[in-house]
Image: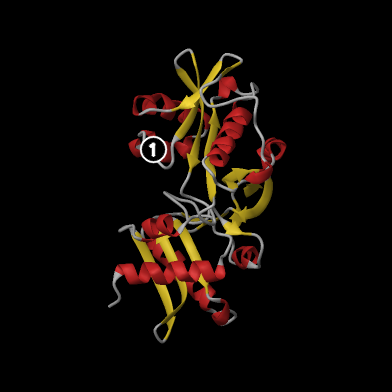
Amino acid sequence: MRGKGLLVNEITKLIRENLPNVIRRDGAIASILSDEDNHIIERRDGSKLTGVSVINEDTIYLLCVDRSSRNQGIGASLLLQSEKHIKSKGFTKINLGAGRDFIMPGVPMNNSAQGFFLKYGYTHSWGESGCIDMHQALDGFCCNDCAIGDTIKGIKYRWAYVSDLDSTVNCVFDAEESFVCYYQDEVIYKHDSTTPVLIAETDNEVVGAIMVNFEEGLNDNSGTLDCLVTAQKHRGKGIATTLTTLGTKHLKDIGLHNAYLCYTYTDIADMYRRIGYEVCMEYFMGEKIIT
């Protein structure tokens, strides 16, 4: 029987060889794959892992078949087995990509995978909105008119402390409830966090937040900005733009060369473009009702 560590390494290798645009680093992927609640279905050619499905509750985190083994029905078999397992647990809907965590937020739309899932009855769950990743090379980024610690139009922008956790979570709950789980981890509010939280504050109330991640990206010279939120009653004041600008500036200031915005919406892509970001990946946010 293969050890969990070996299987995690095999799956990570399969991802890197077949899904090169996955932004999450190996450590984050390993943590997700090591979750005791995962159900993993393998396909092998001898000892070589040629296909895998990683399931967590009602979500298929990953369904990947090695390029050398495609068009042999492996993907279809893995999908049908995955659906059967999820249904056996009492769920009535299947999500592709993002659940309690994610390796990718959805199905990349730079290959034929979207058509595969459409064939099996999956639909895009975000309506007219799309899910995207965006990228910016930091060598050309410039921001000299504001800095972390500044108060701009009555809004102060600063790093959050552990004491700000509850107020930040309240803001996130108001703005985007699905992000609450990411902001509830006390570790990210500590002084040595590699994913510190940058907040916007007025009248002792957190009205916006963004996670500035030093340890994510396609390589060691990149970081990410994640889970941007603005409280509903404070939208239209430039808070999101300023948080993103300051977060990007920080990634450059600490010596990184590339910045990514992960798991975001096409609806706000124009705002990010004004800061210098461009779309590098779009995702099919698939779901399927099962009975």
Image position, residue 272 (x, y; %): 67, 38
Residue 127 seen anywhere in this rendered image of the structure: no
Is 119 positioned to the left or the right of 75 in the image? right
Circle 1: element type: helix
Residue that mark 1 sits on: 188
Q: Is 73 located above or below residue 193 in the figure?
A: below
Image position, residue 32 (x, y; %): 39, 56
Of all residues shown, which one is farthest toward the bottom?
A: 46
Residue in view at x 60 percent, y 30 percent: 240
Comparing 2 with 211, the one in front is: 211
Residue in view at x 69 percent, y 41 percent: 276
Residue in view at x 58 percent, y 20 percent: 234
Q: Is 69 located above or below residue 101 in the figure?
A: below
Image position, residue 51 (x, y; %): 48, 75
Q: In which quarter of the image is residue 225?
A: top right
Image position, residue 113 (x, y; %): 61, 66
Residue 239 seen anywhere in this rendered image of the structure: yes
